[in-house]
């Protein structure tokens, strides 16, 4: 339902998730439904579409793009300073203060006058979307703030359903480029990074929407996104591959070692399964995590009050919290298909991970042992049926046991 800005009473957003016990209230809130509704709606709108696809570009879309261009120019105007610390350049704080001071004017220029009563509430999310000025870091919580900003713009009616494709392919894509500019210019720390065991140091949503873009793609199968030539050729057309290109530009070494979770995902059979699994993973690893949601701000547009209608549900109640030592973690827990034979970074199997062209699936009946010295992000999702009828739980696989740092499972012959 579109909010009437002329009669609606707006309020300054504030924190509401003050303790881990508030997460359940958050997952029952109207804001939770609105954010997931927006996420999945945009996900559907770009299914099978390239970034260059022809779409409706409304005056508001153009104005929001100009707004992001202005913010990007400020990064150019405020270069990093010389300092002894390698990361977290303090010039970011000057940039942040300029954005905070001028954000309302920026959004005022971007939106028609009838939407101006919403500015004090909406602009807060834009400011929060660029990173934290104290820690000089950026993470999925800041990305979530931009998702909330766009959700609010839709709720007040400035953006409409016909703008959906452009919101992803143009506005969000432009925001993503701004984020990379900020991250590289000011050497921003990843907020709450889990290192090699995270999906990405900074972003999550472009992997969701990017995998939707790649559904039904006859040329690019999942295992191909690890190939640098494929990434270079198609990075300008797909958000997913754009993220991989950025990772390859800032990280060195074998892909399986510096981006282990993405390497695992490349063994999944279809982009549809990847897309479905990533949405589940986002709910579990971002929207369900107190370190992320404690910083969320709620107002009248994204309300913390209980939702009157529940369409989108939180992760399963049986999902364990964190990584359980001594257990098998597989992609199957995210609904991404049967478990994969992974080589842990720092170890080698008979075939080097440097040259392994794709992930080799286990036989339908799993036997042998797999290292559990590091948990998988994807393992935080509820269990699913595996091939051969075997069911795993989040805490235990009856046919596997942790065994040091090796993979000793009987491997099938390569197809």
Image (cartoon, rainbow, N blue to C red):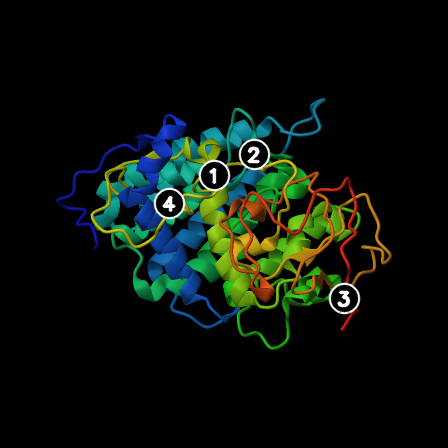
Residue 40 in which image quadrant? bottom left
Residue 319 shown left or right of residue 92 in the figure: left
Task: Name the residue beneath numbered marker 1.
Answer: 141
Q: Earlier in the sequence, mark 2 or mark 1?
A: 1
Residue 385 shown left or right of residue 33 in the figure: right
Quadrant location of the C terminus in the rendered image: bottom right
Mark toward the viewer: 2 or 3 = 3
Task: Name the residue beneath numbered marker 2.
Answer: 191
Instruction: Give x and y (percent) for residue 382.
Output: 49, 49
Mark toward the viewer: 4 or 3 = 3
Q: Earlier in the sequence, mark 4 or mark 3?
A: 4
Q: Earlier in the sequence, mark 2 or mark 3?
A: 2
Dot 4 falls on a residue whose secondary structure is helix
Instruction: Give x and y (percent) for residue 142.
Output: 47, 39
Q: CA distance from mark 2 to mark 4?
A: 18 Å
Q: Which of the labelled discs sits on residue 333, or is there none? A: none
Asked whether the residues under the numbered discs 4 and 3 touch, taking CB atoms below 8 Å apart as contact, a structural biologist would say: no
In this view of the protein, can residue 11 be seen by the observer? yes
Q: Earlier in the sequence, mark 3 or mark 1?
A: 1
Estimate how packed mark 4 is, as few (under 14), some (14 to 19) or many (20 or more) residues with alpha carbons within 10 Å: many
Q: Which of the labelled discs sits on residue 412, or is there none? A: 3
Dot 1 falls on a residue whose secondary structure is helix
Farthest residue to the bottom: give it.
218
For the point 70% across and 24% down, the residue is 85
Task: Name the residue beneath numbered marker 4.
Answer: 148
Residue 304 in which image quadrant? top left
Q: Earlier in the sequence, mark 2 or mark 4?
A: 4
Q: CA distance from mark 2 to mark 1?
A: 8 Å
């Amino acid at each position: 339902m579109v909010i009437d800005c002329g009669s609606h009473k707006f309020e300054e957003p504030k924190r509401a998730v003050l303790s881990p016990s508030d997460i359940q209230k958050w997952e029952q809130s109207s804001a939770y439904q609105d954010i997931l509704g927006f996420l999945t709606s945009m996900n559907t709108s770009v299914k099978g579409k390239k970034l260059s696809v022809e779409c409706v570009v409304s005056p508001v879309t153009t104005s929001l793009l100009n707004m992001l261009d202005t913010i990007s120019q400020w990064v150019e105007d405020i270069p990093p300073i010389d300092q002894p610390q390698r990361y977290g350049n303090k010039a970011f704080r000057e940039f942040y203060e300029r954005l905070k001071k001028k954000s309302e004017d920026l959004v005022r220029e971007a939106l028609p006058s009838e939407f101006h009563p919403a500015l004090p509430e909406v602009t807060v999310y834009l400011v929060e979307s660029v990173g934290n000025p104290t820690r000089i870091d950026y993470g999925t919580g800041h990305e979530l703030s931009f998702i909330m900003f766009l959700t609010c713009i839709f709720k007040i009616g400035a953006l409409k359903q016909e703008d959906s494709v452009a919101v992803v392919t143009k506005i969000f894509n432009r925001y993503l480029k701004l984020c990379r500019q900020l991250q590289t210019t000011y050497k921003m720390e990843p907020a709450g990074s889990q290192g090699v065991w995270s999906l990405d140091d900074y972003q999550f949503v472009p992997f969701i929407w990017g995998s939707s873009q790649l559904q039904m793609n006859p040329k690019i199968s999942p295992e191909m996104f690890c190939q640098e030539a494929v990434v270079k050729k198609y990075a300008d057309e797909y958000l997913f591959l754009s993220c991989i290109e950025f990772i390859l530009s800032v990280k060195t070494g074998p892909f399986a070692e510096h981006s282990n979770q993405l390497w695992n995902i490349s063994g999944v059979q279809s982009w549809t399964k990847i897309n479905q699994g990533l949405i589940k993973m986002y709910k579990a690893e971002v929207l369900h995590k107190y370190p992320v949601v404690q910083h969320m701000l709620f107002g009248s547009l994204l309300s913390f009050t209980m939702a009157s209608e529940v369409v989108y549900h939180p992760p399963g109640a049986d999902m364990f919290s964190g990584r359980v030592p001594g257990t098998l973690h597989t992609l199957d827990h995210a609904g991404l298909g049967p478990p994969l034979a992974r080589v842990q970074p720092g170890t080698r199997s008979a075939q080097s991970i440097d040259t392994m062209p794709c992930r080799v699936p286990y036989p339908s009946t799993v036997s042998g042992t797999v290292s559990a010295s590091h948990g998988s992000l994807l393992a935080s999702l509820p269990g699913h049926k595996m091939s051969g009828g075997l069911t795993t739980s989040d805490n235990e696989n009856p046919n596997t046991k942790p065994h040091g740092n090796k993979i000793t499972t009987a491997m099938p012959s390569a197809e």
